Amino acid sequence: MSEKFLFQVAIDGPSASGKGTKARMLARRLGLLCIDTGALYRGITVHFMENNVCSESDIDKALQEMNLNVKFINAETHVFLGKKDVTHRLHDIDVCDNVFNVSQISKVREYVRKIQHDTASDQSLIVEGRDITSVVFPDALFKFYITATQAERARRRYEQEVAKGNAKVTLAQIRNMIHERDKADMERPESPMIKVADAVVVDATKKTPKQVVDMMEEIITRTLRTIE
């Protein structure tokens, strides 16, 4: 295969479907870079919060001046604001409470898409999110939609929260949160989460991450062999 042959692996899926974990595992196996789209939106949210960005003019100025850098360390996305690594802030409660609203801003979505396209201009990569197969890379060579039942996704997220020491959260709260997030993602006016017709749909409800990644890797390597 020519060294200049580039391709994207686009992965979409609802909240807590495990697409991020599987994307990173796949990236390590294939030796590709992996962009966590959610991390980009969270990095922007951190900047907006730290600089009290609220109005339309504030948003324009912040995006023009914001020095958001993405580095890939061990196949994971690290987000920098200037020289400051803010990756550890990305899942703070205040960021989680605000990232959805920030991610719905059209100019913010355009900013993130530019980063993704610029990164893909000179290298193959894996990108995961909620509108990757439909909007960001609609012509990607590989498209996957990873999902699981709401009950299973709630169970996984609940166990993650308990493992982090969050003793106050209940399974019922997590179930409601996931239900509301699914509804918002599918009904948002811009770039709603959908299953595109040519994506390989993977129901991971009863599959381990390894089983899902094994299947994805087999599809990718088999196809790439026919291109060589």
Image (spheres, grey):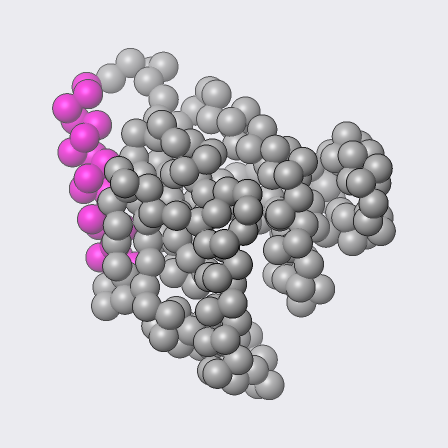
188 sits to left or right of 198: right
Image height of 170 relative to 215, above or below: below
Residue ID at (48%, 68%): 178
Asked if one can make out residue 77 in the rendered structure from this viewpoint, the answer is no
Quadrant holding the C terminus? top left
Magenta region, mostly helix, strand or loop?
A: helix
Q: In the rendered picture of this protein, how many numbered marks are placed on residues? A: 0
Q: Which is more toward the observer, 44 or 197?
A: 197
In x, y percent, where is residue 88? 64, 57
Residue ID at (29%, 14%): 2
In x, y percent, where is residue 158? 47, 77
The residue range painted magenta reads 209-228
Image height of 35 relative to 203, above or below: above
Quadrant of res 29: top left
Quadrant holding the N terminus? top left
189 sits to left or right of 67: left
Residue ID at (72%, 41%): 81
Image height of 2 relative to 137, above or below: above
Say if the magenta span includes residue 223. Answer: yes
In x, y percent, where is residue 21? 40, 55
Asked if one can make out residue 101 in the rendered structure from this viewpoint, the answer is yes
Say if the magenta span includes residue 181. Answer: no
Residue ID at (33%, 58%): 147
